[in-house]
Image (cartoon, grey):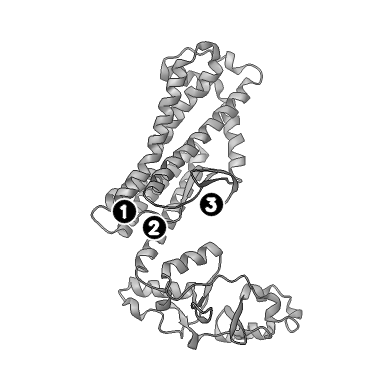
Amino acid sequence: MRGLRIGSAFGIPVRLNWTFLIVLPLFAVFIAWDIAELVVVINQTFGATMDPDQLTEGNLPWVLGLASALGLFTGVLLHEFGHSLVALRYGYEIESITLWLLGGVASFTEFPEDWRHELVIAIAGPVVSVLLGVGSYVAFTSLPSSVDAVRFVFGYLAILNIVLAAFNLLPGFPMDGGRILRALLARNQPHAKATQQAAAVGKVFAFGLGLLGLFANWFLIVLAFFIYIAASGEAQQTTIKAAFEDITVSDIMTPEENLETVSEETTISDLLARMFTERHIGYPVLRNGNLVGMVTLDDASAVEEVERDAYRVEDVMSTDLHTISPDADAMTAFQQMQQNGVGRLPIVDDAGDLVGIISRTDMMRAFNVIQSGGPPRTLGQSTSEPDLQ
């Protein structure tokens, strides 16, 4: 989740994703259009007597719409800080908090696997929303009727923050309620299994939410889609992490003695010929035995066919290398590939020498063997299979 950094608090960067710049004015417009109806709802909920006609004069609805939308997203931001500050107290690192299309998201460097920690962290966000709702209600009832415009904003935020808290407590993993469910399931079983069960419930919830959206609000369909994708992704990530527990890069890598490399002087034509016959699509590039770059099929295919005899590997290779130690955890390698958008990592020792390479194909092959009950220490020993990643 990337975005423009707008500041930080408690050492946590706060970012705005570009989608937020679209949804904020949309919320403001929708609120402005429904001012009269919303006044009726607030009056009925709190037994108030605000006059809808006074709040729909001139440009006032647009001002109230913008103020209410800003207040709503401020509440979302504080909701995420609720999660984040509790997580920091337990010693977890927070990369950032980002406001985007569907509200807010706190990005953890590593999700807690202690069910007690996850339970408290997950509950913290809805607790903050409830407190904001109560605070807004107190402000609404304390202000005089002469400032009904301000009272409208606080009344709206009182209702919306309580609704936000209640909605987040529904078991739509990875929403707060889904994380609470996983924490409770993980009390008596492995974290990975609890994740699979919570994710299954989350997918069913997303399906139901999508059906409701067909008859109620298109926004629910979008939300259901992202819940389903996020549940699937986190379940997969957790399963892979559990499979690679206590597995190091050296257990899976293709070692130096079996490693296929190319030199800087290799032409693109020759490189593509090797890729075809050897069935690899990525090679370390060596100069006098030293690693100087990586070249992939994408790099080679960017050269026009008529120029491939003239261009050499050194002209297209990547020199911005992402490397890893042979003693690193296998899961760390997997995460590094994801974060950097690469399909393979050169493996270098403490002296900086190339000792092997690990690819997504190596990772998936090892994962399949482990899932089948194979012994971890036998992973990655055979390098006869092609690297198709």
Residue position marked by numbered label 2 in the rendering? 235
Q: What element carries label 1?
A: loop
Above/below status of 299 relative to 266: above
Determine crowd level at label 2: few under 14, some 14-19, many 20+ residues with C-alpha closer than 10 A.
many
Earlier sequence position, callout 2 versus callout 3:
3
**How far across and down, in percent of the image, does residue 319 sit?**
64, 73
Residue named by callout 1? 114
**Res 1 label:** 3
Look at label 1 and name its amino acid.
Asp
Please give the name of the residue rendered at 42% of the width and 32% of the height, measured from the top-left corner: 163
Q: In this view, does 369 lie to the left or right of 27?
A: left
Lower sequence index among marks 1 and 2: 1
Query: Residue at point 47% right, 69% down?
Result: 333
Label 3–label 1 contact, CB within 8 A? no
Q: Where is residue 18 in the image (x, y as percent from the top left)?
A: 61, 46
Label 3 or label 1, whichever lies nearer to me, is 1
Residue 46 falls in image quadrant: top left
Q: Is residue 350 visible?
A: yes
Badge 3 marks a residue whose secondary structure is loop
Locate residue 159, reporting x and y percent: 44, 27
